[in-house]
Image: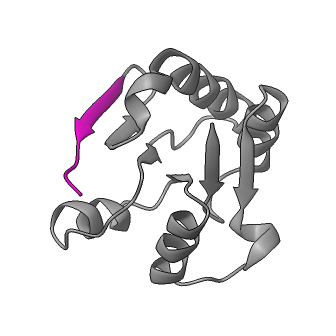
Amino acid sequence: MRFLADENVDRPIVDRLRADGHTVLWVVQTGKGALDEAVISLANEEHAILITADTDFGGMVFRQGRFLLGVVLIRLAGLSPERKARLVAAAVREHSEQLIGHFAVVGPGAVRIRRHLF
């Protein structure tokens, strides 16, 4: 799969997804400090699913109707970056068929997936 990792995504998550064979662009490497609008534009230009820890993207998708191929929101505060990487990689592996066209929230005990309309 093709992902764009927001700058708030820990390096071990990016590294793990890449090691699992995914293409992962990382905002830290392409445009650190980019505004949310620029991140959305880049994700759309790259036809990539956005991975982020920024809850603002939920409002942008559901309230403002912004288009994104898919979103994976990481809600794993307090866990080590390595543990986060394992949980995100497992969520991507187990739910890969559902990520396009959906808003997925990865929490410590569950993955919640909600369809978003484009």
The vertical placement of 42 against 58, above or below, is: below
Query: Which of 112 and 83 lies nearest the eye of the viewer?
Result: 112
Q: Residue furthest left?
A: 63
Seen in the picture, residue 2 relative to 50 is either above or below; the reply is: above
Q: Is residue 91 left or right of residue 24?
A: left
Residue 29 spot, x, y in % from top left: 82, 69
Where does the image place residue 84, in percent across and percent down from the top left? 63, 33
Q: Going by the image, does 85 lie left or right of 75?
A: right
Q: Is residue 17 visible?
A: yes
x 62%, y 48%: residue: 3
**Residue at 37% of width from left, 21% of height from top?**
110
Q: Is residue 7 magenta?
A: no
Residue displayed at 66% across by 66% down: 7
The picture places residue 24, in percent across and down from the top left corner, at: 73, 48
Position of residue 82 relative to residue 102, above or below, is: above
Count all numbered tags in the image, as a single digit.
0
Q: Nearer the viewer, residue 23 or 31?
A: 23
Tell me the quadrant of the picture where the N terminus can be found: top right
The correct choice, above or below, for 65 with respect to 2 in the image is below
Q: What secondary structure prevails in the magenta region?
A: strand
**In what quadrant of the picture does the C terminus appear?**
bottom left
Q: Which residues are magenta?
A: 111-118
Judge left or right: residue 88 versus residue 11: left
Residue 117 counted in the magenta span? yes
The answer to whether residue 106 is seen in the rendering is no
| Residue located 50% across and 15% down the image | 94
Instruction: Tell me which colouring the rendered structure shows.
Output: one colour
